Image (cartoon, rainbow, N blue to C red):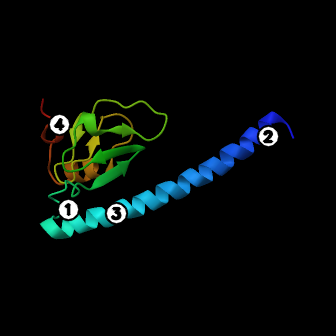
Amino acid sequence: MSEYVKLKTQIKKLQKKANNARRKEINQNIRRVKKIIKIYNLSAKDLGLNKPEIKEKGFVINSLNSNLNEIKKTDGRWSVKAKYKDPITGVTWSGRGIKPKWFVLALSNGKKKSDLEIKK
């Protein structure tokens, strides 16, 4: 067997070992965290876990506190600075491309484009 094939086999075995160790440590830490949560009666809000995320057009957007620093690329496209924001969900739109449903709906309900603009 060639050196390359031996190394690939070793990598595969080590990856399996690492995955098992990771799973074991995660389970131990989850039990520890659950115990602490129970002792201190902590809520999701106390831990900062109550911010739902909305996935739109390849970006993950934190809907409760949406700003440009919280937009992460989930595919290979470049992000563009947001120009409009849905006041209900916090989803943003750059003003480029097809208008999102929330934007069209807001305009049909009497809102103006300027009402939906992100104020600087």
Where is residue 16 shown, x and y percent of the image? 61, 54
Dot 2, crowdedness within 10 Å: few (<14), some or many (≥20)? few
The earlier-in-sequence mark between 1 and 2 is 2
CB contact under 8 Å: marks 1 and 2: no
Q: CA distance from mark 3 to mark 4?
A: 42 Å
Residue 44 badge: 1
**Placement of 73 over or under 33, stated as above or below:** above
The residue identified by callout 2 is: 5
Most extreme residue toward the right is 1
Q: Amino acid at mark 1?
A: Ala
- Looking at the image, is mark 4 or mark 2 nearer the viewer? 2
Picture coordinates of residue 102, whole percent (x, y): 27, 52
Mark closer to the chain start, 1 or 3: 3
Among the two numbered marks 4 and 2 on one chain, the one whose residue lies closer to the N terminus:
2
Which residue position holds label 3?
30
Q: Nearer the viewer, mark 3 or mark 4?
A: 3
Give the mark toward the camera: 1 or 2: 2
Q: Is residue 31 left or right of residue 12?
A: left
Q: Mark 1: which secondary structure?
A: loop
Q: Amino acid at mark 4?
A: Glu
Residue 5 image point, x, y percent: 79, 40
Q: CA distance from mark 1 to mark 2?
A: 48 Å
For the C terminus, the quadrant is: top left
Quickly name the residue at label 4: 117
Q: Are marks 3 and 4 in contact (CB under 8 Å)?
A: no
